Image: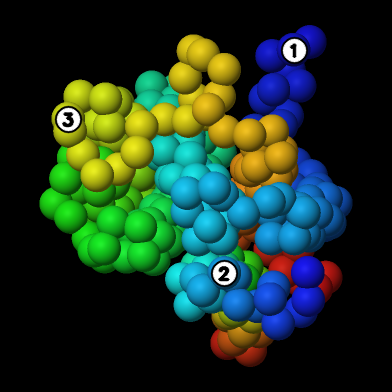
């Protein structure tokens, strides 16, 4: 029963229809959460006693950085599933995730820079956290470039998938970099096995924004995967029927 | 808190608003590009279908 419904879900046509129905609903929830998170983070939350109002960049910076790692892991796991079981949906989700992950990595780096300038006095330092996050951006670019360079999309998925899986070694390096090396970047304040060293009035909007960003990724990956699925299935009857009626 | 105080962000206006603005632009551009690519692909398929029928 479970396997059968899973097979149905992974069937390209069923996925295309279901994802198309889900996108607007998740999108609405995402927008509402963003608006609540923005109001809470920019208006309700108090200024920081050390950093003043500049700390408010945290509500963009930290969720973006979390998403850059999370999306990479989704991409790598889907690539592995695609390589092992040849499930088309996994391959499609993997490659559709790459540009979204690259966007969040770019945002984490750029907002980090905009936060670093007033707080550290510099836009950039070549320390472990920043360098490994930059490497993550190049890994995303590498996956996208490799995929686009190969004509046969099934072969392209395998090649890009292997690169994505190899790049996973960078993920723990990014996460633990602030503990392993001395760096300008502050240590973890939320994700540690202790009470988070961030006040609840700032933690709540941070978590709301984190959930909103996660939903944004879900919406975007469904949208991109639908297109990728159409492209790959262009010679099947269901795609030709679908194109006819539209 | 007055509106001008809000926009002033305790003197960090440039850094804070640049961060939020950049995020807004990148996230919205991603959505628009995805919608546009999807429409373009369907239009391409439809054009191709019509061409194929004409040649029959």
Q: Earlier in the sequence, mark 3 or mark 1?
A: 1
For the residue pair B38 and A187, the one nearer the viewer reads as A187
* Residue count near mark 2 (Cα–Cα under 10 Å), binned few <14, some 14–19, many ≥20: few
Name the residue located 71 percent from the left edge and 40 percent from the top edge. A201
Q: Position of residue A230 (x, y in %)?
A: 60, 58
Q: In the depicted view, which residue is nearer to us: A73 or A58?
A: A58
Question: Which chain is disc 2 placed on?
Answer: B
Expressed as whole percent of the image width and height from the top left, the position of residue A232 reads 51, 54
Placement of B1 over or under A91, stated as above or below: below
Name the residue located 77 percent from the left edge and 54 percent from the top edge: A44
- Label 1 Cα crowd, 10 Å radius (few <14 / some 14-19 / many 20+): few
* Front residue of this view, candidates A45 and A227: A45
Q: Position of residue A243 (x, y in %)?
A: 72, 69
- The span from disc 2 to disc 1 (Cα, nearest Å) is 56 Å
The local secondary structure at tag 1 comes to helix
Q: Can you tell which quarter of the image residue A73 is in?
A: top left
Q: Which mark is residue A39?
A: none
Q: For the residue labelled by badge 3, is the local secondary structure a helix, a strand or a loop?
A: loop
As drawn, which residue projects farthest toward the left? Answer: A126
Horizontal side, residue A240 vs residue A1: left or right: left
Location of the N terminus of chain A (image quadrant): top right
What residue appears at the point 76 percent right and 21 percent down from the top-left corner? A5
Q: Report the number of discs.
A: 3
Q: As displayed, is residue A17 above or below residue A190?
A: below
Q: Are marks 3 and 2 on the same chain?
A: no
Label disc, if present, on residue A2 of the rendered structure:
1
For the C terminus of chain A, the quadrant is bottom right
Residue A181 — which label?
A: 3
Chain to which mark 1 belongs: A
Q: Nearer the viewer, mark 3 or mark 1?
A: 3
Q: Which residue is mark 2?
A: B10
């Amino acid at each position: 029963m479970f396997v059968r419904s899973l097979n149905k879900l992974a069937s390209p046509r069923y996925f295309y229809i279901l994802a198309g129905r889900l996108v607007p609903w998740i999108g609405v929830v995402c927008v509402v959460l963003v608006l609540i998170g923005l109001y809470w983070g920019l208006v309700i939350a108090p200024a920081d006693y050390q950093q003043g109002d500049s700390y408010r960049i945290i509500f963009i910076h930290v969720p973006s950085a979390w998403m850059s790692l999370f999306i990479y892991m989704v991409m790598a796991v889907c690539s592995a599933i695609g390589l092992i079981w040849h499930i088309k949906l996994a391959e499609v989700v993997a490659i559709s995730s790459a540009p979204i992950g690259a966007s969040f990595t770019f945002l984490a780096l750029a907002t980090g820079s905009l936060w670093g300038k007033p707080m550290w006095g510099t836009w950039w330092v070549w320390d472990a956290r920043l360098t490994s996050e930059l490497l993550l951006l190049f890994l995303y670019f590498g996956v996208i470039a490799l995929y686009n360079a190969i004509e046969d999309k099934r072969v392209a998925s395998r090649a890009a998938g292997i690169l994505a899986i190899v790049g996973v070694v960078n993920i723990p390096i990014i996460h633990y970099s602030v503990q392993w090396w001395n760096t300008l970047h502050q240590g973890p304040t939320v994700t540690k096995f202790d009470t988070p060293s961030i006040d609840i009035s700032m933690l709540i909007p941070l978590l709301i924004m984190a959930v909103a960003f996660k939903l944004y990724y879900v919406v975007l990956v469904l949208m991109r995967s639908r297109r990728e699925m159409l492209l790959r299935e262009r010679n099947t009857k269901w795609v030709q029927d679908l194109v006819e009626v539209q | 808190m007055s509106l001008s105080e809000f926009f002033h962000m305790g003197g960090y206006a440039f850094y804070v608003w640049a961060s939020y603005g950049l995020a807004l632009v990148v996230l919205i551009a991603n959505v628009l590009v995805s919608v546009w690519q999807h429409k373009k692909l369907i239009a391409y398929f439809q054009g191709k279908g019509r061409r194929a029928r004409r040649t029959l």
